[in-house]
Amino acid sequence: MNWSPIQDVVDWGSVPDWFGAVGSIASVLFVYLGLRREIRARRSDDLRIRATQARLVSAVVEIRGTSVLRVTVANESDAPVLDVAVLAQIVAPDGTSVELAAAKHVRRIPGHDAQDIFLTVTAEHRLRPADTVLVDLTFTDHDGNRWHRIGAGQPEPVD
């Protein structure tokens, strides 16, 4: 019994049609989410593999007097690292870091070798043995990937 003078011409389909449509949409969404997770996993694995050599490059800092830092950059990998930039920073009590000296550059550090770099601290900073000094390393690995590493943190790719 339709009280409207216009006949209802819309056919909404049947319940099985609706279940089929919802199932199709759900399967497409399921495949999309699975692919997205797989792509992320592969990118993470690729980054882990690329960072193999970068994790073997580290720096240790030694405070000498009140104005000199001795930074030893060690390359424990089999291949050389290139274009190494060393920047020393002091960690302030509030957690911020301040550059202590201009960056020093080393052209090449061979595999299984270490390079000592001496940095002279700017006049406005006086070092104390209790100071926390972080070394900011930027370098290129044997495969041409550029990396950035602060202190003992994990190396991050530089874009």
Image: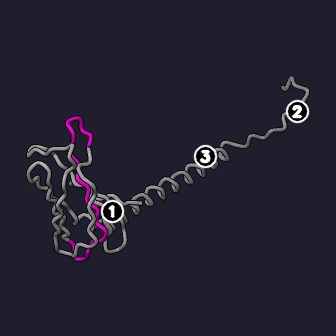
Q: CA distance from mark 3 to mark 2?
A: 28 Å
Query: In the drawing, does residue 35 fall left or right of residue 4?
Result: left
Q: CA distance from mark 3 to mark 1?
A: 47 Å
Instruction: Please tell me whether mark 3 or mark 2 is closer to you in this view.
Output: 3
Q: Is residue 57 visible?
A: yes
Q: Residues within 10 Å of mark 2 (few under 14, many from 20)?
A: few
User: Considering the image in quadrants, where does the N terminus appear?
Assistant: top right
Under mark 1, the amino acid is: Trp
Report which residue position mark 1 lands on.
Answer: 147
Q: CA distance from mark 1 to mark 2?
A: 71 Å
Q: In the rendered structure, which segment of residues is drawn in magenta?
A: 77-97
Query: In the drawing, does residue 80 fall left or right of residue 28?
Result: left
Dot 2 lies on which element?
Answer: loop
Dot 3 lies on which element?
Answer: helix
Instruction: Please tell me whether mark 3 or mark 1 is closer to you in this view.
Output: 1
Query: Which one is nearer the viewer's eye here, 6 or 1?
Result: 6
Report which residue position mark 2 lands on.
Answer: 7
Query: Which one is nearer the viewer's eye here, 38 or 45?
Result: 45
User: Considering the image in quadrants, where does the C terminus appear?
Assistant: bottom left
Under mark 2, the amino acid is: Gln
